[in-house]
Amino acid sequence: MKFLLDFLFRVFQLFTEPYFLVFLAIVIIAVLKRKNKSKNLRIGIFISTVVMVILIGNGFLGKMISGYLQKAYLNTSEMKRTAVQNPVIVVLGGGIVDIDNTEKLHTMSYSRMVTAYQLYHEYRKNNQPCKILISGKGRGHISEAELFSEDFKKMGVADVDIIKEDQSMNTYQNAKFSNEILKKMRTSNIYLVTSGFHMKRSVALFETFGLKPIPQASDFIDTEITWFPNSYNAAFTFIMLKEVVGIWQVQVYNSLEMNK
């Protein structure tokens, strides 16, 4: 059952990709024309595809989704942090890039690193205990957790305050494996650091495992309303649409009790 749903959601995500929509429309129109089907139907499919591509490319759709995903987390950095005692800051990996056989953290990871360090520094400057749990394996030879750890140490984070979870390959596993570590630590006081567009789904998954993280969004994305569609808007709209589908997937799996 879960395998089938995973497959269906992956297929569904394809329909958030503008290039796939265009390719699919061309194939359908070609097939209909070959079979001498209604010309009006072909025109309707063509117009619908053009409208969808325009909405994705001119930033209109992205602007709406951006608010839905991120608005709730715009002011989380202003929350009173001293209210949480002995916190663990959970940082989710943002990916790895491999250039000329040299693996580095994705640019998105650095905003998460800075946000986590700012939190950590606030506690340590007041001589309050605080730990950083880095969650992520990634698809490189070196784990995201290890790369994060190396940079955190250069920033002055004590080695004893760094915990590495280097097995997770996705957000669900981030939540699951982090929860296992947090249980052993017997703490539920956690901050969750990730990108704004990724936060809603991440919080939902951590709550699935009984955790109540305080969200700390590290960065935000948005689109620009333009007269003509452009690749910038299309790229970010695709990222956010994919995230919306991911949120729906979490909700469906939770309702079916398949996320444990």
Image (spheres, rainbow, N blue to C red):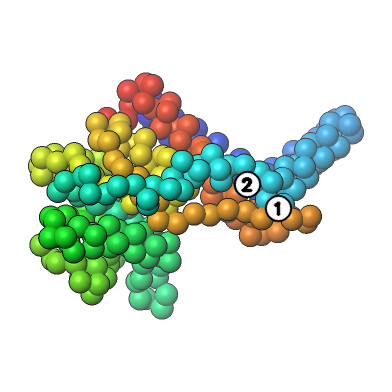
192 on left or right of 246: left
User: How far across and down, in percent of the image, does residue 203 sit?
Assistant: 35, 39
192 on left or right of 252: left
User: How far across and down, in percent of the image, does residue 222 sit?
Assistant: 58, 53
Secondary structure of the residue carrying numbered label 1: loop
Q: Hey, which quadrant is residue 116 in on the image?
A: bottom left
Q: Hey, which quadrant is residue 115 in on the image?
A: bottom left
Q: Residue at x 49, y 45 (%)?
A: 70
Q: Residue at x 33, y 26 (%)?
A: 258
Q: Residue at x 23, y 74 (%)?
A: 154
User: How far across and down, in percent of the image, does residue 113 sit?
Assistant: 32, 62
Number of numbered discs present?
2
Q: Residue at x 56, y 46 (%)?
A: 66
From what the image shows, is residue 8 above or below residue 82?
Answer: above
Q: Amino acid at mark 1?
A: Ile
Residue most extreme to the right: 39
Q: Which residue is mark 2?
A: 63
From what the image shows, is residue 101 above or below residue 201?
Answer: below
Q: Are discs 1 and 2 less than 8 Å apart at CB?
A: yes
Front in this rendered view, residue 253 or 32: 253
Q: Please state, as top left, top right, bottom left or bottom right, where the C terminus lies in the image.
A: top left
Could you tell me how far apart the alpha carbons at marks 1 and 2 are, in whole angstroms?
Answer: 8 Å
User: How far across and down, in percent of the image, does residue 216 sit?
Assistant: 36, 49
Front in this rendered view, residue 19 or 221: 221
Front in this rendered view, residue 167 or 195: 195
Q: Which residue is mark 1?
A: 225
1 on left or right of 225: left
Question: Could you tell me if residue 150 is visible in this image?
Answer: no
Q: Amino acid at mark 2?
A: Lys
